[in-house]
Structures are given as structure tokens and as C-alpha cells.
């Protein structure tokens, strides 16, 4: 059933079209009726003139009863306003005009509307025309013609009303059907979207073959559903992996504690406490990373301060100790606008990942590359296969290669690093390198703080 709600587009469009059509029809109808009324009035006046022309030739020898004609009732009055001749219906009756024009009037033709004239019924217009050629003086020929309304006749009025109603109805029905046909694909899209649930995210809305705008709407809706399905599948995988990663240390700690409770005399409490604390630390790391990702996903606002990327990286490298050699190539005066804490978190995650998988050396470099600032972290480990370079940035990714997440990580560090980069309108990718993995971070430089670059000599920790 079509939706005929007042607020619906179909109803409002049809109502507006009907109103405009009605106004246009009313305007044309008024013009038509005014024309028809003017023509009817001219015809009536022509009949009065025809009656005068019919009587004038016999005015010197008038019979008492004038022959009937199509020009209407006629009376001939002498100079004393006495009826000397009349058509059959007015024989023996007084003058039709109760105030006939006087002979002193200069107007040859005058008329009055009487309701009714003497001897007649209804309203009539009495047209009085003077005869100056009669030997006895100025006589009058009075002709009764119908009173013509401004709209002409009733036939003209009903015709105008009927045509206006017909045209307005046809326009309203036509627009109603056209809009309904146009909105049918939209209604089909709405119906399909209303039926899509979490268990049916693979469903898509129908795409019409014509109507480019509606087709674009359907394609956009399907693209949105594709992203929604992908996000939901990613959320399911993330939830499953997160629950597994949280459950594993909890299960291990529970088993250790239950064993210690069952055999307290055989338990090495110091060793058991150390193992439980390690599990708690792992849980704390996972929860912290999950909260960080939640804040990043929520696009929580952060401060943007001008920061020298080379100095920031250098300070973090000097603050920590590493089990492998660190080679630094840091150029100062490479300024960016960003949150220092988040940029530091990104760097720490890259360094932690590189340190877990490096064999003997990590190279860290900062430089300016046109409008962007570049940070590279390169290790000399096994590296990544080309097909895994994007996969490693997914949350809780597990790879079979030697660089897969080990017991020292949460599986969220690289995902957090990329989220931080994108929040700063930057990119974080893995590029080709002769050996190991080469992570490249690119961030927009701050033009107002860009200065001549000063090369800092390589130093080794």
C-alpha cells in the first residue's frame, strides 16, 4: 500500500502539483469566461441592432403586430410614449421600459436593465434606439435582450469548471503515479534495510537499472553495508582474539594458584608468585592496549603541539637501554604538529617490535622529505613476506613466520602505532629493505616551523 502520509514526499508533491494545476486552470477559466461573457453580450447587442434594423424600414407604415423574429420582444413607441406596434407577446401591454429615454436626449441608443420589465418575466436589458426619420417626430424602438452575466452562459461556466477539474485530477493522478514509480526503488531499498539484522549482514539492497540518482543511492548503501559487514567481522575476530588472549594468562594463573593451594608444602612460593605476577603484567599490558585502541577508535581529541621529531626520538632513545646496538641518524628541525605522548607511544611500539626480532642492530632515522617528516625503524631480523606487510597491522594477528607475535608482546602494538599515525593524518607502512623489516612513518611537516636541516652525525649506543 502506498504511504499517503501528509509529510510524505509523494503526498506533498502531488498536493503541490494539484494546487498549482488548479490555480492555472482557475486563471485560464476566468479568462475564458470573461471572453465568453463578452461575446455573449456582443451577440445580445447585435440582436438588438438587428431588431431595430428590421423595424426601421417599415416605421412609416407600422402594423399593430410586428412579425416575430430572433431578435427578441420589440415595442415601438411614438412621441407620447404610447405603444404603436409590438411583437405578438407584447400586444396590448404597456411599455417595457418604465423610464424610457426622452426625445430631448442626445444619445441615439440607451439601455436599462429591469427586473422584470413590464409585460415580461425575469430580468431583461431594454435597449432603446431612436428613429429620427419618422414624420411625426422622434419615435423609439425598444428591444428586450437577455441579461448576460460576466461569465456568459451556464454552459460556459459548467464547461470551464468541468475542464478545470478534469485537468487538475489528471495532473494529480499523473504526478502521484510518476512519483510513486520514481520512489518505488527507494521504498524497496528502505524495506531491505529494515530487514537487515546482525545475522544477515551479507544482504544487499536492490540496485535499479535506471534512475541514476537512486542507483547511486543504492550503490552507496551497498558500499556502506560492505564496510559495516567488514567492520563487524573484524570486531568479531577482535573480540574472539581478545577473549583468547585474556583467558590464556588467567587460566595459567588459576592453574598455578589451585596447584599451590592443593600442595602448599611442595610449592615454591617465590617462583609461583613471580609467575603469577608475570601473568598479571601481561593482562595489564593487554588491557592497557585495548583501552588505548578504544580511545583511538572513538577519535578522542588530543593536543597538537609543534614538536621537533628528531629531538623527540633522540630523547626517547637516550632514555632507554636495549639489548642490541642502536644506530641513530636523526636530523633536527623537522617539525610536526602532534601529541608528544602518542608519537612517543608509536615510537616505543616500533622499537619494542624491532628489538624482539632484531639479531644485532636497529637503525632509527629522522629526516624531512618535502612536505612530510619521515621516521624509519629498521631491524636486521628475518623481515616480513610481501603478502604479510599489511596483515601485521591487524589486531591480534598471528603469523606462522618467525616474526609472529611472541610471548613478549600483546599483538596490538603495531595496530596502535598505525592508528596513532592515521590520527595525525599520516601513514605507517612496511617498505622494502635489504634485510629485516623497515617501518616507515610519514607525517605532515609544519611549514611555519620548517628550517634548514642540520645533520646529526651517526652515534652508536
Image (cartoon, rainbow, N blue to C red):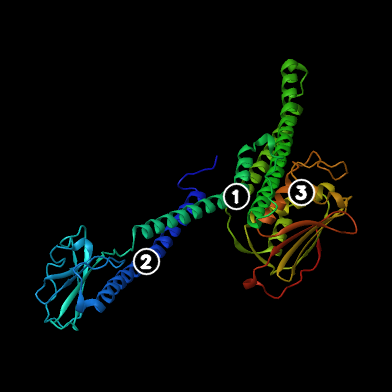
Residue at image point 47% right, 52% down:
169
Q: Earlier in the sequence, mark 3 or mark 1?
A: 1
Q: Disc 2 marks which residue? A: 36
Q: In which quarter of the image is the C terminus?
A: bottom right
Q: Mark 3 points at which residue?
A: 393
Tell me which numbered mark, 3 or 2, is placed earlier along the sequence: 2
Q: Nearer the viewer, residue 281 or 343?
A: 343
> Is residue 198 depicted above or below 139 in this figure?
above
Quote the CA–CA distance across marks 3 and 2: 84 Å
Residue 341, visible in the rendered structure: yes
Q: How crowded is mark 1: few (under 14 residues within 10 Å), some or many (20 or more)?
A: few
Q: What x and y, as percent, mark residue 396? A: 76, 41
Quarter of the image that includes the N terminus: top right
Camera-nearest residue between 160 and 107: 107
Q: Quadrant of residue 251?
A: top right
Furthest residue to the left?
80
| Residue in the picture at 49% in, 48% down | 8
Give x and y (percent) for residue 123: 21, 61
Q: Tell me whether the residue at label 3 lies in contact with that at label 1, contact meaning CB atoms closer than 8 angstroms.
A: no
Q: Mark 1 points at which residue?
A: 181
- Residue nearer the viewer, 285 or 316: 285
2 vs 1, front mark? 2
Judged from the image, the secondary structure of the residue bearing numbered disc 3 is helix
Amino acid at each position: 500500500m502506498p504511504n499517503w502520509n501528509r509529510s510524505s514526499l509523494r503526498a506533498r508533491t502531488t498536493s503541490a502539483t494539484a494546487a498549482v494545476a488548479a490555480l492555472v486552470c482557475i486563471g485560464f477559466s476566468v479568462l475564458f469566461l470573461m471572453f465568453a461573457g463578452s461575446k455573449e453580450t456582443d451577440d445580445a447587442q447585435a440582436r438588438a441592432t438587428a431588431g431595430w434594423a428590421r423595424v426601421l424600414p417599415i416605421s412609416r407604415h407600422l402594423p399593430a403586430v410586428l412579425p416575430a423574429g430572433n431578435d427578441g420582444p420589440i415595442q415601438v413607441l411614438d412621441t407620447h410614449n404610447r405603444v404603436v406596434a409590438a411583437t405578438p407577446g407584447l400586444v396590448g401591454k404597456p411599455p417595457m421600459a418604465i423610464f424610457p429615454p426622452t426625445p430631448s436626449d442626445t444619445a441615439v441608443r440607451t439601455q436599462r436593465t429591469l427586473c422584470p420589465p413590464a409585460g415580461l418575466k425575469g430580468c431583461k436589458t431594454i435597449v432603446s434606439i431612436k428613429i429620427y426619420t419618422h414624420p411625426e417626430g422622434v419615435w423609439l424602438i425598444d428591444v428586450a435582450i437577455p441579461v448576460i452575466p460576466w461569465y456568459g452562459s451556464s454552459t460556459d461556466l459548467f464547461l470551464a469548471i468541468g475542464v478545470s477539474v478534469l485537468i487538475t485530477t489528471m495532473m494529480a493522478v499523473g504526478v502521484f503515479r510518476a512519483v510513486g514509480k520514481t520512489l518505488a526503488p527507494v521504498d524497496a531499498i528502505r524495506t531491505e534495510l529494515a530487514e537487515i539484522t546482525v545475522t544477515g549482514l551479507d544482504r544487499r539492497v536492490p540496485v535499479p537499472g535506471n534512475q541514476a540518482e537512486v542507483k547511486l543511492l543504492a550503490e552507496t548503501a551497498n558500499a556502506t553495508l560492505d564496510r559495516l559487514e567488514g567492520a563487524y567481522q573484524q570486531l568479531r575476530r577482535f573480540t574472539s582474539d581478545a577473549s583468547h588472549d585474556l583467558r590464556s594468562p588467567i587460566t595459567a594463573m588459576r592453574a598455578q594458584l589451585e596447584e599451590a593451594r592443593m600442595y602448599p608444602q611442595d610449592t615454591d612460593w617465590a617462583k609461583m608468585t613471580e609467575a603469577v605476577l608475570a601473568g598479571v603484567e601481561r593482562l595489564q599490558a593487554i588491557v592497557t592496549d585495548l583501552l588505548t585502541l578504544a580511545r583511538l577508535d572513538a577519535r578522542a581529541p588530543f593536543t597538537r603541539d609543534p614538536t621537533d621529531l628528531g629531538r623527540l626520538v633522540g630523547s626517547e632513545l637516550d632514555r632507554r637501554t636495549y639489548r642490541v646496538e642502536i644506530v641513530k641518524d636523526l636530523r633536527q628541525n623537522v617539525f610536526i604538529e602532534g601529541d608528544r605522548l602518542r608519537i612517543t607511544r608509536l615510537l616505543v611500539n616500533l622499537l619494542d617490535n624491532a628489538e624482539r626480532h632484531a639479531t644485532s642492530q636497529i637503525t632509527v632515522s629522522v629526516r624531512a622529505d618535502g612536505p612530510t617528516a619521515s621516521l624509519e625503524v629498521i631491524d636486521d631480523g628475518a623481515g616480513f613476506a610481501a603478502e604479510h606487510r599489511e596483515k601485521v597491522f591487524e589486531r591480534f594477528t598471528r603469523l606462522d613466520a618467525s616474526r609472529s607475535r611472541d610471548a613478549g608482546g600483546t599483538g596490538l602494538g603495531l595496530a596502535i602505532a598505525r592508528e596513532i599515525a592515521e590520527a595525525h593524518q599520516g601513514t605507517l607502512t612496511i617498505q622494502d629493505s635489504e634485510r629485516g623489516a623497515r617501518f616507515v612513518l610519514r607525517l605532515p611537516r609544519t611549514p611555519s616551523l620548517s628550517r634548514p636541516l642540520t645533520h646529526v652525525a651517526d652515534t652508536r649506543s
